[in-house]
Image (cartoon, rainbow, N blue to C red):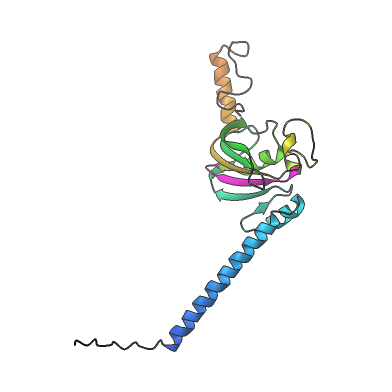
Amino acid sequence: MSSVTAVPLQPVKRSHKIWLWLGIIVAIALAVALAWCGTRAAAATKLPNDQWLAWHKGQSGIKTTTSGLQYQVIKAGDGPTAADQDGVVLAIHGTLRDGTEFQPAAPMRFQVGQPMIPGFIEGVKLMNKGSKYRFWLPPSLGYGAEPGAQGPGAELADKVLIFDVDMSDLVPAAVIQQMMMQQMMQNGGPQGQGGAPGGPEGIAPQQ
């Protein structure tokens, strides 16, 4: 019969044992921390708007303006931030706290300063070309804090609105003004046909 020569196993050095146990302890602590954070987040979803916003304000990466708008920079852009009368090209998507979609993902073009919900305009003015942000609008910066309101957006009254916004282009107000002047001259001045009192093509609001 053939015999199998046993290879003796070397005992684990004491220092290696210490590092092994430290690794296990760290892994357990991390798992507990993640579970605790997940439990807190799940519990927070049931809080009223004001309490939820106060909790959310302290989460990592969240910034809050003096008005109460909360935002997170997902991707930084380049150049100046948007200002009144600048033209912006956006991709937007809107959801509620429970994940309900109220604004399907869609492109949007407009001149900053046109009538829109205040929190959205404030958020857009924080952005520059190439940036992507996420906004959390308190009801006071959205469609109002009173449920049962009438008019456009009434079903969104007393709701925290969450917007994912991607700014693919920004056209300065001076450039838009120059484009309008050129277009007016090409059409025979202010009295000519085909003027663009609402701004050049591609800048007017587009739902």
State left or right for residue 179 relative to residue 6.
Answer: right
134 drawn magenta: yes
In magenta, the rendered stretch is: 129-139
Q: Which residue of the protein is positioned furthest toward the left in this rendering?
A: 1
At x 70%, y 41%, the residue is 119
Does any portion of residue 19 appear in the rendered image? yes
Residue 125 at what x, y percent from top left? 64, 41
Residue 165, horizontal then vertical, whole percent = 58, 41
Left or right, residue 82 beside residue 51:
left
For the C terminus, the quadrant is top right
Q: What residue is shown at x 80% (from left), y 37% (from top)?
A: 148
Foreground: 20 or 178?
20
Q: Tell me: 1 left or right of 70.
A: left
Residue at the outermost front position:
1
Relative to 61, residue 32 above or below: below
In the drawing, does residue 130 fall left or right of residue 100?
left
Q: Is residue 58 visible?
A: no
Q: Position of residue 177 (x, y in %)?
A: 59, 26
How many numbered discs?
Answer: 0
User: How far across and how far down the image is residue 14, in percent?
Assistant: 45, 88
Which residue lies at the image location 76% right of the left edge and 51% below the top edge? 50
Q: Main secondary structure of the magenta part?
A: strand
Magenta segment includes 133: yes
Using the rendered view, name the quadrant where residue 56 is placed: bottom right
Q: State the residue in front, 23 or 194.
A: 23
Where, quadrant-wise, is the N terminus in this rendering?
bottom left
Picture quadrant where residue 61 is located = bottom right
Q: Is residue 60 above or below residue 126?
A: below
Residue located at (68% from left, 33% from top)? 113
Task: Tell me the quarter of the picture where residue 199 sits.
Answer: top right
Choose between 172 and 140: the one closer to the eye. 140
